[in-house]
Image (spheres, rainbow, N blue to C red):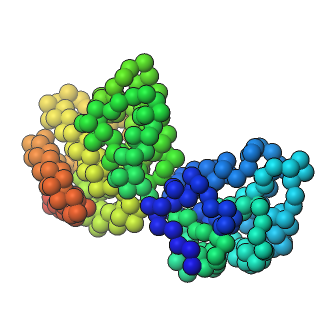
Amino acid sequence: MVAIKAADVDAFVARPDPKRPVVLVFGPDAGLVSERVEALIKASVDDPNDPFALARLDGERLVAEPSLLVEEAQTVPLFGGRRAVWVKAGGRNIAPAVEALLGLPGGECRAIIEAGDLRRNAPLRTLVERAKNAVALPCYADSERDRARLIDEEMRAAGLTLAPEAREILIPLLGGDRVASRNEIRKLALYARGRDRVGIDDVTAVVSDASSSAVDEIVDAAFAGKPAELEAQLAKARTAGTPPGSIVFAAQRQVAQLHKWRTAIESGTGFSLDAVQPPLHFRRKGPIEAALKSWNAARLAAVMGELADAVLQSRRNSALAGTIVERALLAIAVKARRSAG
């Protein structure tokens, strides 16, 4: 069985093993899957745009014609050079077609199979992991270390340095999709063009939370006093690998905004959510209206302190960061519900 650890995948992608010409790239991070497939294709053919060098197949077609994969793999390039086959499995079971390919002796053609998140016992994954002439490359959500390495890589390529405090804020803002994270960092580098150093103001002005929609639902549920909904959203975030730091950062940003709006309401300045710029997404308007009814400015100021303490505790106990952040948010939700009741 050939099983590559997640930490060793990039090394294989950089230097593919010619003895394992069949490569399955799969996992929940679609952006990382796409990025690694692209890298493998570039390492396998001289010109990815040459249809004679790179054959493209999809799962639907292979289910109908399983022998097509073997035929393409055995085709000799019309003008010489290297050849590869790129297969997009989609949701179809293409294991029979791949099994026939694995039975071929040797071969110069590399087959790159792009798939989504596959269970451990999925036929395609099991087949590839057990074959001596194939390898399965898992693509899971980036860890904090992965995101830090990605930041360094992009900043170095742009000829920029990142202030330590800006780096600390940027890491949790990057989510579980590699392509989305890389695009956010490149957008930041473009914004800072002409300067040598990137600071906190640059990060807050440019970078969006790569998993902002899901995180918004978490913080909205907390401040609107919906503990049950909050627990459900937190469970989804754990499954998706959303960093606790990005969640608590969003909560801090939210409480600061609510405090500003609530202060305006209490001062009688005629505040209206309809006038907020940029406009709120229609799905967020209801939860935020509920939050503004449940909290007053003084209580929101107290929550700011509680969240700051949660951040401090999570940094001191990184192994318990998720638990610390979740407890802080659940406490907020319970207080909001009691106030609303």
Vertical position of residue 114 compared to residue 275: above or below: below
**In this rendering, would 108 be left or right of 144?**
right
Q: Residue at x 61, y 50 (%)?
A: 39
Q: Residue at x 40, y 24 (%)?
A: 192
* Residue 91 in sight in this render: no
Q: Nearer the viewer, residue 271 or 251?
A: 251
Q: Residue at x 87, y 58 (%)?
A: 76
Vertical position of residue 320 compared to residue 175: above or below: below
**In this rendering, would 53 be left or right of 334?**
right
In the rendered image, which quarter contains the N terminus? bottom right
* Residue 107 in sight in this render: yes
Q: Residue at x 21, y 39 (%)?
A: 256
Q: Nearer the viewer, residue 2 or 114?
A: 2
**In this rendering, would 134 be left or right of 58?**
left
Q: Name the spot of residue 159 as percent of width and height, x first.
A: 43, 28
Q: Name the spot of residue 193 as percent of width and height, x first.
A: 44, 22
Q: Name the spot of residue 322 as percent of width and height, x first.
A: 25, 61
Q: Nearer the viewer, residue 213 or 141?
A: 141
In the rendered image, which quarter contains the C terminus? bottom left
Q: How many marks?
A: 0
